[in-house]
Amino acid sequence: MIFHKEAAEGRWFKFTLMEQLANVGSDIERAIVWKNRGNKEYSENAFFRALELLSLTIIDKKNKGPRLRELCRVREFLIDYFLFDNQYSFTDDKFWQAYFYNFAYAAAIAKGR
């Protein structure tokens, strides 16, 4: 299932890395909020939307080298945190909120907000 049809059709690749990760972070935030409210279905849907955007970010040709390595690692850690046994021991949601907040903040500054 494709959640972000316009993004998958190429619009996503026009965004900067900061904008891409800010958008991923928005869905991660939604996943966390719904998880904490006890709505597993909404949380999983938000997580899978974030994962789709992160996958589009990973295949974006401008995100090479160290960027690509970090993006792949983030995807691995997120999947472990939300879907598996949390073997990397991210013990709370605050780590992910802070991680993605930085990208949202940088994207806002770049746009003059």
Image (tube, grey):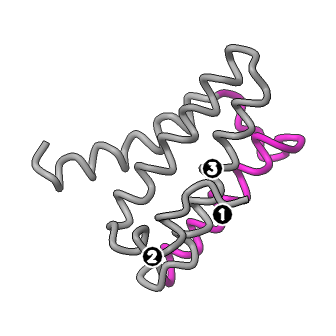
- Residue at the right extreme? 85
Q: Is residue 79 left or right of residue 3?
A: right
Would you name the residue on which mark 3 appears?
A: 49
Cα separation, mark 1 vs mark 2, equals: 24 Å
- Residue at the left extreme? 112
Where residue 80 sits in the image (x, y, percent)? 80, 48
Q: Residue at x 50, y 77 (%)?
A: 66
- Mark 1 and mark 2 lie on one chain; the one further toward the N terminus is 2
Label annotation for residue 10: 2
Picture quadrant of residue 83? top right
The correct choice, above or below, for 37 with respect to 15 in the image is above
Secondary structure at badge 2 equals loop
Q: Is residue 83 left or right of residue 7?
A: right
Would you name the residue on which mark 1 appears?
A: 73
| Image quarter (top left, top right, bottom left or bottom right) of the C terminus | top left
Q: Residue at x 62, y 67 (%)?
A: 55
User: Magenta residues?
Assistant: 64-92
- Residue at the top extreme? 37
Check disc 3: other Cα within 10 Å, few if <14, some if 14-19, many if 20+.
many
